[in-house]
Amino acid sequence: MEKKPESIFINRELSWLDFDSRVLALAKEKTVPLGERIKFAAIFGSNMDEFFMVRVGSLYDQTLLKTNKTDNVTHMTAAEQINAITPRVAELQAKCDKYFQHLVSALAEQGYHKVDFTKLSKQQEHFWKTYFQRELLPLLSPQIVDSRHPFPFLNNKDIYYIAQLHSKNEGVSYGIVPVSSQFERVLFVKDGETACFAFVEELIAHYAATIFTASTVQKQCLFRVTRNADITVDEGMMDHDVDFRDVMSELLKKRRKLAAVRLQFWPEAPQEVVKFLRDKLVVPADRCYTQTSPLDAGALFKLAGRISGDSGHADLFYPAARPMQAPAGYDLYTEVRKHDVLLAYPYQSIRPFIKMLLRAAADPDVVSIKMTLYRMASDSQIVNALIAAAENGKEVVAMVELRARFDEQNNIDWSKQLEDAGCTVFYGFDDYKVHSKLTLITSRVNGQYKYLTQIGTGNYNEKTSELYTDLSFITTRQEIGEEASSVFNNMALQRLTSEADTMLVAPLRFKSVLLEEMDRQIALAIQGKPASIILKNNSINDPQIIDKISEASCAGVRVDMIVRGICCVRAGVPGRTENVHIRSLVGRYLEHSRIYCFGSGEAMRIYIASGDFLTRNTERRVEVGVRVDDPAIAKKLRGILDLQLRDTVNAREMQPDGTYTKVHPAEGKPPVDSQMAMFGYFKDGFEMAPEKPRPEPKAAPKPQTAAARAVVKPVVRQRAALRPKRASLLQSLFGRGKK
């Protein structure tokens, strides 16, 4: 019997858990400063919360529908995926508990001792009991659950104390005490010369039994419930003649009441209590987890933050590394008219971009500013710049995506402020999220319209610009501006963009273009010519792209992939992906930029984009990217990729079985930290150049020979029902109009 070819696919959910495992690994990495290790443990917990709310929540919903829907790469049903997930989560949680104990021991060596409420001296007992009675007890709201008192609604991710109670008259009942969000999560006290810290929920758990004086506390613990957050706009919600903001506000109310998908217990899980909560919340046994690390990872962020505020502990954290500021006299608004500009966050400051928006807001030649807004800071200077432009009489058009998960309320609030300032606000497509990072500034100079276009890989968010690695390409090339104008008009008119030359625009002009680029490299390899593909993004699960990567590998193309998170393709599988090399970079900064590079030298074609290779990005979102034709910037982008492929500090490489191993420097070679090296790489990034002619855009590739065409599979390009046409000036300025 012929042996079945080895699968190259990895389940998406299991791959996501592998990513969080790589995050957790940094919580025990001795080369990482202690304070940062605490943060990585916190990030692991925060990631796991989102995983259950979104991914497990979605799978849970699928199981209720009782359909045979399977995932698109491994073809596992929702039930099969949940069954595969649950033991892996338990394994990771056990690791987290172990690493947390190591962190506690390491903190003690640094003079920070965690309070163990089971081992208090009489003096300590008196202090904490007094603190509990004076500071906490007046704010506690205990509840009894019995035949006369119904089970209360439990908020998503809140911590609760629960006790099984027994009285002679009433028999068995339960007492529940919410741990108020008003409480300081981490309490710091001085015990002589020793600094001590305690988590407030543990303090409450120690003394809460004293609240229920009429009963005997038989069993007790802390617990936390995680609820499904995977809720989308229902067609029925759109039947009414209401603003989409109101629909989203209603959706957020519904989300708070969705089904429970996980129960966490600390420090032990009394079986009677577990059964009681499981019955009330309808959570299966395999989604109940007992842990000794904090139930809410937010407490670890608080702990790290408190320690970082103490003097004399700078060595417990990464050395300070602030974004490089532009030199005095640097004006991006002026500079980009001389040459294309690439900004790299967090290595360079986002301030020049904000100042550029403010310059445009005040420039009498500027007639309109258009921008897509997905995630914004709560105190966004960028949005305030748009408001200033509107107040200065500019036409400001903002495409605000209200469905940016967990940022919905922030986006609703900003959309109202934008409208109040006189901006034109619209909300994108019914069936496609707008995930693009696109800005277009239109000026009228000497009777002609001129464009300034920015295309980025990251959100317009000042806070994340100091935490995420992202790229921002800014140009005044007229041809790119015209394409960007067409994209904005199509979005405003609910049309997908199907035609562009330099820009990538999902879902119709994104995947197809990149597949064509891969086909060119495959054809070169078959002809015996040099061929290469380098793909850097956050995630990949699109089966069509994975198949093309496998095809390229089989043709002899070397494929290097830098994938931070979900990666549903296995590297190094004989006869399938043996020329595919995959690494993940997890370090000080969150790798977020997307760079797609095909070929090398003069023939190299390189793109940046907002979209990953998940099917949601390639087929169900409006993403925007651009081919970078400026030789200097293209070389700079390729240099970033080459640097990350040499990383021996943050990198882990995938093995043929799908596992990852840490990359170590070769013997005698110094370690390469690509993230920190980027500060040096961009030290002259704010170029101030004299006026000079722009390089001509690269010519389109020459037609292939008949032999080459024979080995390249044609890519069928979808076309929109309504093809975009050159918009009128009125459309260009006003979009769809205010709601």
Image (cartoon, rainbow, N blue to C red):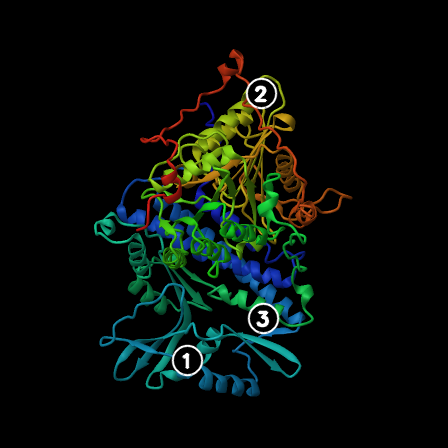
Residue 78 location (% of width, % of height): 35, 45
Is residue 705 toward the left or the right of residue 319 in the image? left
> For this view, does 532 lie left or right of residue 455?
right
State if disc 1 and disc 3 touch (CB < 8 Å): no
The secondary element bearing badge 2 is classed as: helix
Q: Residue at position x 45%, y 77% from top?
A: 204
Residue 60 in the image: above or below residue 506 = below
> Which residue has dot 2 on it?
524
The kind of residue on which mark 3 rests is: Arg
**Front disc: 3 or 1:** 3
Identified by mark 1, the residue type is Ala
Which callout, 3 or 2, points at the residue further toward the start of the chain? 3
Residue 513 visible in the displayed image: yes
Disc 3 secondary structure class: helix
| 268 on left or right of 588 | left
Disc 3 to disc 2, how far (Cα)?
Answer: 57 Å
- For the residues labelled 3 and 1, the Cα–Cα distance comes to 26 Å
Q: Nearer the viewer, residue 169 or 144?
A: 144
- Where is residue 518 drawn, in percent x and y? 52, 27
Determine which residue is flagged by label 3.
306
Residue depicted at x 46% and y 56%: 388
